[in-house]
Image (spheres, rainbow, N blue to C red):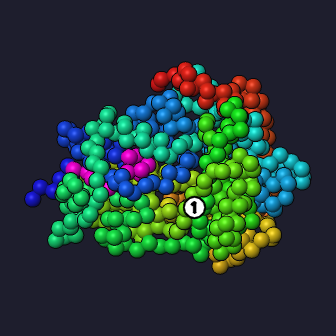
Amino acid sequence: MNDRVRQVVIVGGGSAGWIAAARIAAAHRPGGENGVEVTLIESVTIGTIGVGEGTWPTMRNTLRKIGISETEFFRSCDAAFKQGARFTGWVTGEPGDSYYHPLNPPQAATQINLSAHWLRRQDGAGTDFAHAVDFQSALCDAGLAPKSISTAEYVGLANYAYHLDAVKFAALLRKHCIEKLGVRHIIDDVTGVKLDEAGFVTGVEAKATGLIAGDFFVDCTGFAALLIGQTYGVPFVECGDVLLADHAVALQVPYEHEDDPVASQTNSTAQAAGWIWDIGLPTRRGTGYVYSSRHTSHDEAEATLRAYLGPIADGLNTRRIPIKSGHRQRFWEKNCVAVGLANGFLEPLEASALMLIETAVDFIVDRLPQSRAVMAPLARQFNAAFEHHWARIIDFLKLHYVLTKREDTAFWRDNRDPATVPERLREQLELWRHLPPGPQDFPHQPEVFSWPSYQYVLHGMGFECNLAEGSQVTAEAALAQRCFMATQRQQEQALAALPSHRALLDAVRVHGFQAV
């Protein structure tokens, strides 16, 4: 029997479905020896959440690989640059409580770990860690872009990701897939899933189209998890005992003036029962309050968001989004793999949702099974990798909460309860009181959040550690000083050379970037 994979069927659209379709179609064009036909079926009666507006720098490679120019992306998706995240009110809630998690790694990160050297420099009034070891936080402070209009596409002076309109992004991907990549697009409602005697999916039944046959299936049906959950019955592993927020209320607001500055970082501002995201796009801001309904009511949550925004939100409608934090016990079953919300869902702190879609699709594209014979070992690899990814993301998100010194509300006090902290994170925090996070702490490669990210949050949150003494610190003192001075020089040069974020976004609409 010839069971070679020739037909890939993606069930569901949105960002997950169309990223999967674009990457698979671009990498495995039909007609060649390893070519496949890609079909995507989506329903017009099932909407998308459409609030995943933050990406990682990985999105630059994704767009490049599928053949979308950066200029087209910016113009089509109301996109802006993202250079990291700024956390306000997370440590004490007092005025001045703010720190950055930039996308640039610390200066000379492959040569020296500056954590202990930075602590030695502190006498109670030194430069905060993010500003001392890298220049990107200063760019955010000044409202500057990470590149100029003359810089080539997908290249920057500083590392960057994007903020985008998720609905417009899915529309761009859909258009590109259909017109440029030959993806077969079916608009219909799936009414059933057909399995053979071995438990492999052979096709999905659609209301108007009938049977859509395939050899390999990607479940992008969101929370419904039509294939991985409803058909295969793979359990959902909840983590609401660790991440306490279980709802979000979202609101899109216009700028007061069309030339208002556009923030080039995600602003995450702590509140009594959670935190508010604030993302700047060229034409509007995307905002939302992530909260725990055990610590505030839905009405109080909406009132909190409106109070944060002020009169500009008057008369605008909100959307309430339930958050059931967790992930599937397995992600790849037989010839079906779950991507996006069907895979799992966490609160949007640190914007991991689109990155996880890209990571899953990268695996599928790089290791697309040739036949059923190889699917079982590939499934084991994929499931092990994603079990690790989910666990580490949960750890990193919890890190932001457990390090708080806030005692003003039950939400923040409950987040410090040791019973809510994963065991591995507890062990790492004990170690990091004596040794700074480093590559040895993250042997799994590639790691979603590695040691520089942990350093930015640990030092930003004022984690108490005794790292400033030791022979290695003394021996490397001269190199560390050169690194701190280099950061200062880079900051001065970047501040003088780079345009404002708003000015660059305006210029892109008119002129575009230099094509690669």
What residue is drawn where x is 68% and y is 49%? 313
> Where are the magenta residues, as a range?
7-19
Residue at the location (16% across, 56% down)? 3
Q: Quadrant of residue 299?
A: bottom right
Query: In this image, 202 relative to 19: left or right?
Result: left
Residue matched to label 1: 320
Residue at screen point 57% across, 47% down = 54
Label 1: few (<14), some (14–19) or many (≥20) C-alpha neighbours in 10 Å: some
Judge left or right: residue 455 versus residue 17: right
Q: Secondary structure at mark 1?
A: strand
Residue 13 belongs to magenta span: yes
Can residue 502 be seen here?
yes
Give x and y (percent) for residue 92: 81, 62
Nearest the eye: 396 or 270: 270
Residue 107: tell me if it is visible.
no
Amino acid type, mark 1: Arg
Is 342 magenta? The answer is: no
Residue farthest toward the front in the current orientation of the protein: 315
Residue 256, image quadrant: top right
Camera-side residue: 167 or 107?
167
Give residue 65's position: percent from left, percent from top: 40, 37
Residue 295 percent across, percent down from the top left: 69, 73
Q: Is 250 on the left-hand or right-hand side of 275?
A: left
Q: Is residue 506 above or below residue 365?
A: above
The relative height of residue 63 versus residue 319 in the rendered view (above or below) is above
Nearest the viewer among 296 and 101 is: 296
